[in-house]
Every structure is written in structure tokens, then in C-alpha cells.
Amino acid sequence: MGYLLLALGGLCLAAAPAAAAVLDESLTDYVGSGTPSLASPYGTVTLNDNGGPDVTVTVALASGVGFVNTGAGYSLTWDLAGAPTITVPANSLTPGFSLVSSSPGSLTAGGSGSWDYAIACATATCGHGGNSPYTGPLSFTIDNVALADFIANGSGNDFSADVCLGVSNGSCSGGITGVVVANTGTTGQSTVPEPATISLFGAALGTLALLRRRGARRSGSPSQG
């Protein structure tokens, strides 16, 4: 039994690197002109470290919020330590969006500061101005980066997004457009076991239970002599 427990412990240690780190940040502050009627937060940016090394970024907007093309900013902006050249596989990016990357600090998003990277929304997807907001999630993967590479820009903001606050019947006619930012650091971080890790751990526990039942039957058998 002692050997099995040691083996079980070894399996747990071996499976540890398969855990995925997940970090969430809230888009909480509106930095555009005017005063929105919608209450914050306006959405969540989730970073999932897949250990590839790559990170999948997902932006889920709150009800009544949609990505727009006002010219004030982009659907999402961010900075990375050292401003490396990055790759976003086309098959990982939500259709209708594209990667924008230029010289460091050359991208601006009204009131949120300067940025190195952005995801832009095509007019066919987000309309022109605020006439056809895109409310669905935005998702993409950045190759060869880790969570620790994401940093705040020179204005202390982690992300920004050009949105409509007050989408109604597919339009922003009754809402307000502008840039919202995440600048309060992480709102939550967790380590999620990968399915293979869970299966391995479950199999080890099942084996342990089986051997314990066999041991119990043997100890209860009459002795022969």
C-alpha cells in the first residue's frame, strides 16, 4: 500500500505542469466624452495561458455593450514586455477582426494612452460609427507569449476597447460610444486542471480503492494451515 501511495503522489506531481493559468480583468472605466447610462463593469478580458507557449484572449462584453468603429480606438488594445513581434493565427481570431501591430507606442485609443498592439473590427462586422455594434465575444490566440508578458501601458491601463454603451435593437442610437479600459490589475486568477490531469488522478484513486477492497477480502479469509 505504501508503494501505491508513493506512486499516486508521483502521478500528482507529474501532472502539475498540465494545469492552465487563467487571469480575468474587468473593463471598468469609461474614458470617452459624456456620461454613459450603463453601470460598470462593461466587460471582461480573460487570458488563458495554454502553456504552448501561447495565450488565448477572450473579451466578453456586458449586456447592452458592443464593439464599434468610431475611430476613437480599437476593439482591444494591449502591451507586452519588450514589444516583441507577435503572431495571431488566423484560425484563432474571431471572423471580422484583424491584428494591428506597428512600432511600439504608435497606436492611440482616445483617453486611454498609447499602445503597441490592437485588434480592429471590420466595418462589415461592427458597422460605421455606432450604427451596428457587434455584441458577440471576441477571441484570439497569441503565440509565444505568457501571462507575465502582459503589462500596463504608459498611462497605467492594461486593456482598452472602443464600444457602444447602450446597444438596443442592434443599434447605438440611444447609447453613447467611447473607450473603456481595464486598469485595476487582475480581478481573479485561478489554476484549472487539464482534463488529462483529472483523468489520471481519477484512475489512480480508482486503483487505490480496488486494491484496498482486495486487501480487505484477503484479511477476512480463514487462515489455512
Image: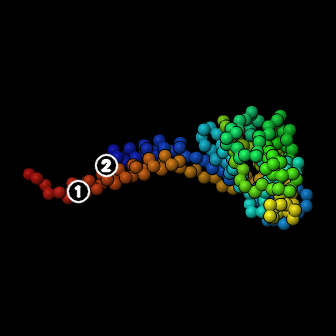
Q: Which label belongs to residue 1?
A: 2
- Closest to the camera, between mark 1 and mark 2, is 1
Residue type at tag 2: Met
Mark 2 secondary-structure assignment: loop
Q: Is residue 52 visible?
A: yes
Q: What crowding class fits label 1: few (fewer than 14 Cα within 10 Å), some (14-19), or many (20 or more)?
A: few
Q: Position of residue 152 (x, y in %)?
A: 77, 45
* Residue 225, x across and y down, in percent: 8, 51
Residue 173: horizontal and vertical position, in percent?
Answer: 87, 62
Find residue 217 and name its label.
1
* Place of residue 41 in the rendered image (x, y in percent of width and height, measured from the top left): 76, 61
Q: What residue do we see at 80% from left, 47% from top? A: 121
Reading the chain from its start, which is encountered first: label 1 or label 2? 2
Q: Secondary structure at mark 1?
A: helix
Identify the residue at the far right of this view: 33
Residue at image location 83% in from the left, 60% down from the top? 171
Q: As rendered, which of 186 and 53 lies closer to the eye?
A: 53
Label 1, label 2: how far apart the Cα atoms are = 15 Å
Count of residue discs: 2
Residue type, numbered disc 1: Arg
Q: Mark 2: few, some, or many residues within 10 Å (few <14, many ≥20)?
A: few
Residue 165 shows up from this direction: no
Tag of residue 48 = none
Residue at the spot 79% in from the left edge and 37% down from the top edge: 101
Q: How is the image coloured?
A: rainbow
Left or right for 196, reference 117: left
Q: Residue at x 79, y 53 (%)?
A: 67
The residue sitting at the left extreme is 225
Q: Farthest residue toward the front? A: 124
Compare residues 196 and 113 and report the one nearer the observer. 196
